[in-house]
Image (cartoon, rainbow, N blue to C red):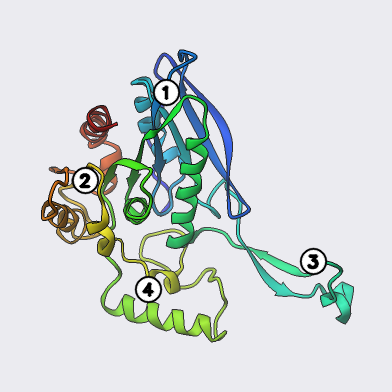
Amino acid sequence: MAEPLYPPLVMPDGVDRGQVTVWSNGIALDADLYRPTTIDPDAALPAVVLCHGWGGSKLTAERYAALFASAGMITLTFTQSSWFGSGSPLQLLGDAPEFGKGAEDRHGNEALTRVRFIRDLVAPFAWTANLRAALDYLEGEPHVDPARIGVWATSFGGGVAVYLAAHDDRVKALTVQVAAIAPVSGPVADLARKRAIDTARGVIDAIPQGVDPWPDMAGTPFLAELARFDPLAQVDRLRMPTLIIDAGDDELFAIADNGGRAAQVLRTLPGTVVEYQVIPGITHYGIYFDGYEPGSRAALAWWKRHL
């Protein structure tokens, strides 16, 4: 499934957008920075990093980022590694044949080899590292108050954001929508464990490409990583105010087992601030269309209350 054709961004008055590069583990991530046009020299503003989902890009979140910036925040959207305009991890394929058998002989720390560029990979731990790098970038942006940084995320990116926020105390408020939070289960979990074992033993490629297609989704899921990726198990570590928004007619997964279950866990924790909203009558991708207005306004109100 290709990324939906979202309604076009109408840039609000008083907001500037500029393309920037976020570096994550040596990979250049394509990103956009949104800032209020006028900022007082001594201002320290709240800031939000926005994280897309499976098959998405920085454009998934552009309308949200512009809206938040129009309310006086500095916001950053980025594209996960190996997708669209972002750089790729490399897989080593061995010596370049034109350089002969001795090509593996290193001179210092350099060698000649063949590589494969990995594209369209859904790798949850790499995505988590990329989100952390985006936080690092935003924390260093002029006029950002490091004590008032939030994370907004959608779909598969919602689970990534939950995982990151559970381990990074810079996240002072969290908003996720139509979030995939539960781990893989059933036959998929069994296959994922097999992939992890076969990867470790060198039976299959270390980084998959074009295998294990997910129904109706683009790209390659890194099942060996998904076998160990369980955002739901991290929910009880969340200590920041958390807003969870779901689509009442989500067709991709059961919201009761994902956002609903996460909200249930958070409500059992003393002192936790959590709000769970279900927008009726919309599908998973409907959150960006008929669900955009209520979802984006709820997120904006959350930032105003908690950042």
Return the residue at label 4.
Answer: 227
Q: Residues within 10 Å of mark 3 (few under 14, many from 20)?
A: few
Q: Quadrant of the C terminus?
A: top left
Q: Which mark is residue 44?
A: 1
Which residue lies under the disc numbered 2?
A: 244
* Mark 4 secondary-structure assignment: loop
User: Which one is closest to the eye, mark 4 or mark 3?
Assistant: 3
Residue density around tag 1, few if under 14, some if 14–19, many if 20 or more, within 10 Å: some
Q: Earlier in the sequence, mark 2 or mark 4?
A: 4
The mark found on residue 201 in the picture is: none
- How far is the residue under mark 2 from the one under mark 4? 24 Å
Who comes first in sequence, dot 4 or dot 3?
Answer: 3
Q: Are marks 4 and 3 in contact (CB under 8 Å)?
A: no
Dot 2 alpha-carbon crowd within 10 angstroms: few under 14, some 14 to 19, many 20 or more = many
Please give the residue where the numbered disc 3 appears in the rendered image.
109
Q: Which quadrant of the view contains residue 274? A: top left
